[in-house]
Every structure is written in C-alpha cells, then in structure tokens.
Amino acid sequence: MREFVKEIAAAYNFTQTGTELVAGRETSSSLPTPSGLCADSQGGEGSSKIRGRVWIDAAENQWVKIDAETIATISFGLFLARLHKGTHIVTEQMRVNDEVWLPRHTAVHVDVRLALLKNFDADLDVVDKTQEVPRADQIVGIEEMKQSCLCGISPVIGCC
C-alpha cells in the first residue's frame, strides 16, 4: 500500500489553490495535475485520466478531503475492469479526540464494467454517525483486565 501511495504522489504535481475551513479545520487546497512520471506504474497509468482537488490539514499535514473524477475511461488489466468517464468520489476524514483520523463521509458515483460481462452504475453515500469515540487511554487492555478481575471468575482470561 505504501508503494502505491508513493506512486500516486509521484504521478502528480500539486498546485496550492488557497486555504479554507473543512469540517472546522484550516486546510490548504491543491489541484493535482499529472506529472508525467510513473506512467507505466500501477498508480501512475491512469493519472492523466483523473482530475480532482485535495484538502490538507494545515496543522497536521494530513488529507482531510479528496474530490476526484475520471475524465476518461481507465482500464485495469486486459479484461478485468473498465472504470468509465464520470466516476466520481468525494471522501472526507475527521480528527477524533486529537488522536486519530477516521472516515467521516464518502460519496461515490461509480460506472464500471467488470470482465466484459457486467456493468455497474451505482451511487453510494456513507456517513459515519459515530458520536463519541473512546480516547486511547480509556481503552482497557487484557493486562488491566487480568489485574482487576477476581480469582476464578474468568477462566478465559486466566486470572490468578
């Protein structure tokens, strides 16, 4: 996965277009344009066929929002899949408890043909409805459970 991310980063040049608030966080927005590099790699081959915008959190240098759309058909393998022009994805993540970044919202319109047999044209909208996520120091581990349990009550954990 890290190699794929490196290939994507090498496949684009990012031009900062300004700053704005996204989900209450100060971000810088960028327009990625194909760099021409890695055109033969897995991540770079479709780079000239995707346009979009990326918002990066100013304080943590973490992506907050990505809006991408295919502007031409992208083929994967000889007959495996064809992602058609107009496929669109918007995905956002949020900082939770000042500890971790988690998905917040993803909206996808996909138009794909799989193995020359089946076309899928679908819309998907997923919103994370998590109201509260425990902080890392609130999560109890097995060792703490072993120390706090009474002898003989929990043979599964192996107390005493």
Image (cartoon, helix red, strand yellow):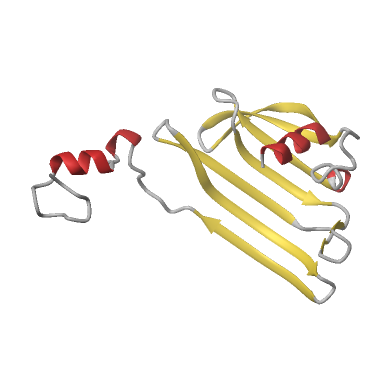
Where is residue 41 drawn, in percent x and y?
Answer: 85, 42
Where is residue 37 drawn, in percent x and y?
Answer: 88, 33
Q: Quadrant of the N terminus?
A: top right
Q: Quadrant of residue 7?
A: top right
Name the outermost residue toward the bottom. Answer: 117
- Name the one closer to the observer, 151 or 28: 151
In the displayed structure image, the side of residue 49 where residue 4 appears, left or right: left
- Residue at position x 50%, y 39% in the image: 94
- Name the one closer to the observer, 75 or 31: 75
- Residue at position x 79%, y 43% in the image: 43
Where is residue 65 drawn, in percent x and y?
Answer: 62, 40
Q: Quadrant of residue 74?
A: bottom right
In the displayed structure image, the side of residue 156 where residue 84 appears, left or right: right
In the displayed structure image, the side of residue 93 where residue 80 appears, left or right: right
Name the outermost residue toward the top. Answer: 59
Where is residue 18 drawn, in percent x and y?
Answer: 70, 26
- Residue at position x 43%, y 54% in the image: 129
Q: Is residue 12 visible?
A: no
Is 78 rendered above or below residue 53?
below
